[in-house]
Amino acid sequence: MRALCDSCAHQQLVPNTRGSVFSLCRRSRTEPERFARYPPMPVLECVGFTVMSPTPQPATQQHHAADRAAQPPARVTALSVTAVKGMRLQTTDAITLTRQGARGDRRLFMIDARSRMVNGKQLPALMQLSSQLDEQRGELTISFPDGRRLSAVIEPGEPVGARAYGDIWEGTLVDGPWNQALSEHAGQPLRLVASACATDRGEQGAVSLISRASLARLAQEAGAERVDARRFRMTIEFDGVAAHAEDQWIGRELAVGGARLRVEGHIGRCLVTSRDPESGEITLPTLDLLRAYRAELQTTEPLAFGIHASVLRAGEVRVGDSLLPVPGDAAER
């Protein structure tokens, strides 16, 4: 029993490779003298307790029906995940969203000899690899370009704090057959780390979304027939709205399949989007294209393309499900 921690906004769940999950207090990073990193359970009283934001009450059925009549729902057209952050995306017909993101998605990441998180931006060769995680069995499979597939149950390892984006990501080192093969492929020492959530923005960016119309608009700027959505490594791709309509959803809630999301911000882009999603070679001047027609926009991050969201209500999402801003939510009132 974790008592207060389970409903506290400062909780971060950290799994180990034995299948246990620990409750980390984020406030320990800025106030270590006041808050333990892993507080003894159960926590019944805490001066730093901050209740998680509740889901606003739904609008009336009349308002709900009128809003839907005026705005047909968008539809999910693609879902993508990768067990190991930085490796090639894998498409799937269905995902289960939790507070930490899609189940089995980005549950591991890689660190270098200096305990820095690395991905395709620093090591484009990693984009040639694919990974799948069988969560029930705890089995990780990594596939290499030469046809090798390394599969094993994840073995226990030691806790580690990795440097990523100016923060410390907590996780556990992963033992097994992969580290040597990954190091040889990348040409430098690498180690796998298991984590509850290895998305760039943590639980605030547990899910990422992009519309097909926005992808088509970028292709138009590039003078290309199409732009591969995998460049942007998004969880959910959808159709049925105008180009960049999702830019206006910041602060709003989205109903998608059986889940409820809250859009937290725009996703600023980096060099990795210029790389081919399979070879890792730079094949598209993505940042120059975005700068040419989106640099002056007021967005939460520069050179934005797509949005990120937190998960308010867990649920399954399938290709073909509806996606619609929730009528009458706090952002509308």
Image (cartoon, grey):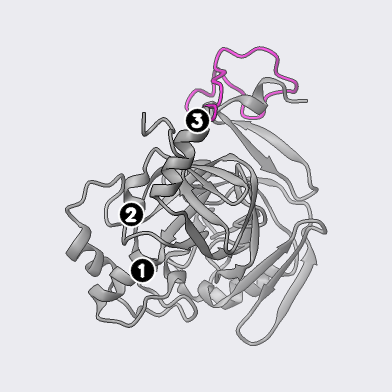
Task: Give the residue type that dot 2 points to.
Answer: Ala
Tally the marks: 3
What whole-number distance in Å separates the C-alpha atoms at marks 1 and 3?
A: 35 Å
Residue type highlighted by circle 3? Thr
User: In the rendered structure, which disc, 2 or 1, sits on the residue that comes first in sequence?
Assistant: 1
In space, the residues marked 2 and 1 are separated at their CA atoms by 12 Å
- The picture quadrant where one finds residue 290 is bottom left
Q: In x, y percent, where is residue 156?
A: 78, 52
In-front residue for pair 116/227: 227
Location of mark 3 (residue):
60
Residue 176 screen position, x and y as percent? 75, 64
N-term mark: 1 or 3: 3
Q: How crowded is mark 3: few (under 14 residues within 10 Å), some or many (20 or more)?
A: few
Front position among marks 3 and 2: 3
Residue occupied by mark 1:
215
Which residue does the image show at 72% across and 21% down from the upper left? 3
Which residue in the structure is indicated by mark 2? 245
State the residue at coordinates (18%, 65%). Answer: 292
Is residue 187 in sight in this rendering?
no
Left or right relative to 224: residue 56 = right
- The residue closer to the viewer here, 98 or 131, is 98
